[in-house]
Image: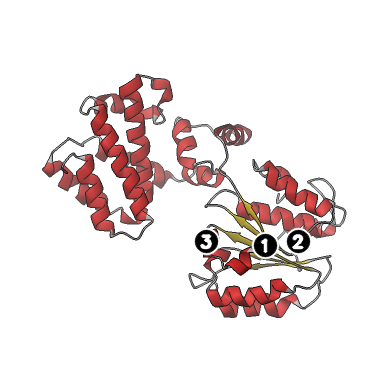
Amino acid sequence: MNDFGNIYGNEFIKDSLINMIKFNKVSHSYIINGYEGLGKKMLANAFAKKLQCESFSEDGCSCTSCRVFDIGNHPDIIYVAPEKKASIGVDDIREKVNSRVMIKPYSSKYKIFIIDMADTMTVAAQNALLKTIEEPPSYGIFILIAKNLGAFLPTILSRCVVFKIKPLGDEIIKKYMNDFGIKSELEDFLLAYSKGSIGNLIKIKEDSEFINFREKIINAVCLIENKNIQKTVELINKLEVLRDSFLDVLDILYIWYRDALVLKSSKREDLVINSDKIFDIKAFIEKFSITELLTASKAILNAKIFTGSNVNFQMNFNNMLFEIFGLTN
């Protein structure tokens, strides 16, 4: 629990953090960056625990510090995160970091501040933190967990060691599934949809609502008929209520059309991700040419790009479906 040995993949980052401690090259400020579900918080916790370990033994240490950490009550490791607000404000940093960092550690070598969702800090909050990390006390360590490096001031970035967590390969995800006995007829889909994230894998595997959600999208897709305005309007009405899960809709649609293209062009059933829906895909591809399937795939990709660019949802959604149905010039 909370050990490097329990973290899958990202060996370079794990080795780097361990060696920093081993060879006394610990910096005061770190940013661990990566998208949701890649294990940023696990790495931060493992690093903090190892920093405070009384013996720097291998994983599974039973020293007082490690035992206290594992029960979530370490006095010298402080967590900061947005609470009622969507961002971390200047008062949060002043009260939870700056006012406490000058108090020496209670029982450990370091006083560690783990700032979750650090990329939500306001400019004022970042400037307040900057004053501390520019001239930190010798025992102060700051670990910032983030999804968006672009949200940080250049002055913050310049004073932090930055680690970018990469998505895991399918083999590592499969190893995790084997180690924890995760078996499913949706294995290929789970691998693709997890996007190299064990966190995503766990989330969708245990979420029966998501499995039903996928069924709803696929059932709707199977009704698609090219250049059919009535069907287009029906699908718009059916999927518009899912606007809060639009990215999930797009991911499911994109994997579906990817499978349709693969099966239409190569006849290779072994390459299909939605392998549990092979008969539905076979029926689906009879209605469309490769060119039409490519056009639909590009429309979905464009919709994903526009979704991250604050484009009006309704316009983005409608344009995508009209392109998929072949109703644009």
Q: Earlier in the sequence, mark 3 or mark 1?
A: 3
Secondary structure category for the residue under label 3:
helix
Cα separation between marks 2 and 3: 22 Å
Secondary structure category for the residue under label 1:
loop
Residue found at x 70% / y 51%: 2
Residue 249: x %, y % from top left: 34, 46
Residue found at x 81% / y 54%: 21
Report which residue position mark 3 lands on: 150
Residue 23: x %, y % from top left: 85, 52
User: Label 1 near label 2: C-beta < 8 Å?
Assistant: yes
- Asked if one can make out residue 89 in the rendered structure from this viewpoint, the answer is no
Q: Residues within 10 Å of mark 3 (few under 14, many from 20)?
A: few
What is the three-letter code of the residue carrying label 1? Answer: Cys
Q: Quadrant of residue 123?
A: bottom right
Q: Earlier in the sequence, mark 2 or mark 3?
A: 2
Q: Is residue 71 left or right of residue 283?
A: right
Q: Which mark is residue 160?
A: 1
